[in-house]
Image (cartoon, rainbow, N blue to C red):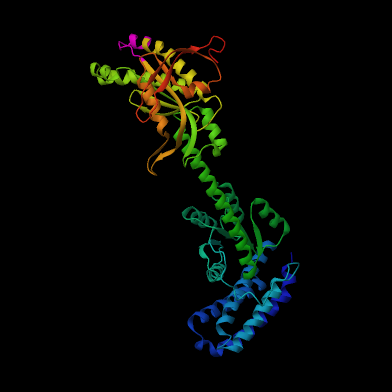
C-alpha cells in the first residue's frame, strides 16, 4: 500500500489542477446553473478538505485510515468533476477543460502505489444497466452517498442509503435489497461488523455485498472475502467497473431467489401431499410420494385399483335408539379401529360416508398385490369386529355388524374439486359397482367381484357365490363370499 509520502507528489498535481479550475470558474460562477454550481462548490470544498488532510489532518490515525480519508476526498472530487464535465462542456468549455485536468490528476493520485490504473475517460457516461435492482449504499461520507446515488440511479437502480452500520441493518430489516455497497471505516459499527451480522442472518446472508474502501492492505481484503464479501473495490471507484460488479451481484441474487422460489414450491408440494394423504394412508406411502412425486398424478389418471367399501348394518335404526353422544362415540371407536387396519395394509381411505368407508388399493401408489391386500384387509376388519363389540358391551352400547364389498376395475384417480377445496379420490363406473356389491352383504359378510378373485395371487377359502343384476350393467354380476385365506397362506 502506498504511503502518504508516495501520494503527496500526485496530490500536488491535484491541488494545482484545482487552483486552475478556480481561476477558470470564478469569473463565470454566477452564470452557471444552480445544480452544476452546487456541484462545483462541493468539488472546491473537497479540494479544501484534501489540502487540510495533507497539511496536518489525521496525524493521529493509522496509515490505512488516513489513506482511506484521502481516497474519500479524491473520490468526491473525481465524481463531482465528471458530472460537471457533462453539464458544462458545451456552455463553458474552458471550465470543462480545467475539470478534465482535475479528473486526470485525481486518477493519477488514486492510482499511486501498486493499485491498477482505472480508466479516466469512460467513467462519466454510465449507460442504463440491462439488469437493475434495489441497492443499499452504506457510507458515513455524505459526498460518497450522493455520488453513489447519482451513478446508480442513472443506471436504472433504486437506491437506498445508510450513513452508519446500525442504520444499514435497520434498512435491511425494513425492505428487500438486492446488493449492498459497504464502506469499511465508519464510526460506531464498522463495515466488518455489518458484514459479519449480515452473513450470520439466515434471511440476509444471500444478499451480495461489495466492499468499497480506501484501504488497500491485502490482509484486510482477504479478511473481507473470507467473511463473505462478494467483491472488493477501491476508492475512488470506477463507475463502469462498479456497474459490472453490481450486475454480477444481481445475477447471483436472481439465481438465489429462483432457487429459493423452487425450494418453497417443493415445500408447498410436500405440505400438500402430507395434508392430502397423511390422515388416510400409511407413513410409508407418504414418504414414497415425497421421494418419488412422479408417482402422484394429480391431474387425473386412469388406472386399475381394488376398492373396498364397508358399511354397518342397520346403522340408521341404531342411531334412532341412542342419544347423539353415544352414537358418535360408537362410530368414532369403530372408524378408528378400521382406519388403522386399512392403513396397515397400505390402503388409501378415500372417504367416510357416515358409517361407510371407501378405501382404495392401488392409488396413489400402485402395487402388484393390491387385490390380495384388499381381501386380507377385509378379513382383518371383520375379525376386529369382535374386539369392537366387546368394547361396546363394556360401555353399554349395542353390538354392531358390518358388510364389506370388494371390487377391482379401471377408475379415474386424481385431485377432485376446485382450487379452494379439493380431495384425492376416484370416480367411475367401478366405484358404483363396489357400492352395489357391498349392498348385497349381510352382517359379517365379505363379497368380492370376479375381477378381484381373478387377480388374487394367494388362494382363499370361498363360500357360496351369487349373482345380482346391477343398474347400468346388462349381464348379471357374479359375487363370491370370502371366508378366509387358506391355512397355508393365512395371515400372509
- Quadrant showing the N terminus: bottom right
Percent x, y for residue 2?
74, 67
Instruction: Please tell me which residue lies in front, 91 or 472.
Output: 472
Magenta region, residue range: 390-401
Decide if residue 363 is in sight here.
no
Indicate the quadrant where residue 129 lies. bottom right
Percent x, y for residue 53?
64, 71
Decide if residue 82 is in sight here.
yes
Q: Residue at x 54, y 78 (%)?
A: 39
**399 within the magenta span:** yes
Q: Residue at x 54, y 45 (%)?
A: 263
Percent x, y for residue 322?
25, 16
**455 within the magenta span:** no
Instruction: Please tell me which residue lies in front, 166 or 281.
Output: 281
Residue 75 lies, with reference to residue 273, above or below; the image says below
Q: Residue at x 27, y 16 (%)?
A: 318
Percent x, y for residue 385?
40, 13
Q: Is 209 on the left or on the right of 334, as rendered? A: right
Q: Report the number of discs.
A: 0
Amino acid at each position: 500500500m502506498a504511503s502518504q509520502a508516495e501520494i503527496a507528489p500526485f496530490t500536488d498535481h491535484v491541488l494545482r489542477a484545482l487552483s486552475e479550475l478556480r481561476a477558470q470558474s470564478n469569473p463565470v460562477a454566477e452564470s452557471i446553473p444552480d445544480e452544476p454550481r452546487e456541484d462545483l462548490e462541493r468539488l472546491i470544498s473537497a479540494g479544501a478538505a484534501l489540502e487540510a488532510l495533507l497539511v496536518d489532518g489525521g496525524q493521529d490515525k493509522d496509515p490505512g485510515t488516513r489513506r482511506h480519508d484521502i481516497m474519500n476526498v479524491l473520490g468526491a472530487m473525481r465524481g463531482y468533476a465528471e458530472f460537471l464535465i457533462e453539464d458544462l462542456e458545451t456552455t463553458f468549455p474552458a471550465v470543462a477543460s480545467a475539470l478534465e485536468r482535475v479528473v486526470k490528476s485525481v486518477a493519477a493520485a488514486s492510482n499511486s502505489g501498486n493499485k491498477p490504473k482505472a480508466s479516466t475517460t469512460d467513467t462519466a457516461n454510465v449507460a442504463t444497466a440491462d439488469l437493475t435492482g434495489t441497492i443499499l449504499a452504506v457510507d458515513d461520507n455524505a459526498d460518497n452517498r450522493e455520488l453513489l446515488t447519482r451513478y446508480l440511479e442513472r443506471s436504472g437502480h433504486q437506491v437506498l442509503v445508510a450513513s452508519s452500520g446500525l442504520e444499514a441493518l435497520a434498512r435491511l430489516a425494513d425492505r428487500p435489497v438486492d446488493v449492498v455497497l459497504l464502506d469499511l471505516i465508519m464510526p460506531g459499527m464498522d463495515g466488518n461488523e455489518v458484514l459479519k451480522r449480515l452473513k450470520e442472518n439466515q434471511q440476509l446472508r444471500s444478499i451480495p455485498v461489495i466492499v468499497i474502501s480506501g484501504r488497500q492492505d491485502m490482509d484486510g481484503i482477504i479478511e473481507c472475502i473470507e467473511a463473505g464479501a462478494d467483491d472488493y473495490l477501491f476508492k475512488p471507484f470506477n463507475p463502469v467497473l462498479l456497474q459490472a460488479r453490481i450486475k454480477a451481484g444481481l445475477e447471483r441474487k436472481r439465481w438465489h431467489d429462483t432457487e429459493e422460489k423452487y425450494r418453497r414450491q417443493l415445500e408447498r408440494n410436500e405440505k400438500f401431499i402430507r395434508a392430502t394423504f397423511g390422515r388416510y394412508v400409511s407413513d410409508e406411502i407418504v414418504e414414497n410420494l415425497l421421494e418419488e412425486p412422479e408417482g402422484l398424478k394429480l391431474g387425473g389418471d386412469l388406472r386399475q385399483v381394488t376398492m373396498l367399501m364397508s358399511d354397518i348394518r342397520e346403522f340408521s335404526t341404531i342411531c334412532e335408539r341412542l342419544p347423539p353422544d353415544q352414537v358418535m362415540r360408537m362410530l368414532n371407536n369403530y372408524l378408528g379401529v378400521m382406519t388403522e387396519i386399512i392403513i396397515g395394509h397400505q390402503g388409501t381411505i378415500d372417504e367416510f360416508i357416515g358409517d361407510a368407508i371407501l378405501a382404495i388399493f392401488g392409488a396413489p401408489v400402485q402395487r402388484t398385490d393390491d387385490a390380495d391386500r384388499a381381501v386380507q384387509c377385509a378379513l382383518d376388519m371383520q375379525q376386529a369386529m369382535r374386539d369392537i363389540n366387546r368394547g361396546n358391551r363394556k360401555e353399554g352400547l349395542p353390538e354392531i355388524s358390518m358388510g364389506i364389498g370388494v371390487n377391482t376395475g379401471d377408475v379415474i384417480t386424481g385431485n377432485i374439486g376446485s382450487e379452494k377445496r379439493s380431495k384425492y379420490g376416484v370416480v367411475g363406473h367401478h366405484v358404483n359397482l363396489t357400492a352395489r356389491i357391498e349392498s348385497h352383504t349381510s352382517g359379517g359378510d365379505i363379497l368380492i367381484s370376479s375381477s378381484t378373485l381373478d387377480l388374487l395371487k394367494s388362494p382363499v377359502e370361498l363360500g357360496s357365490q351369487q349373482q345380482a343384476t346391477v343398474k347400468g350393467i346388462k349381464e348379471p354380476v357374479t359375487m363370491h363370499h370370502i371366508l378366509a385365506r387358506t391355512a397355508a397362506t393365512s395371515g400372509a
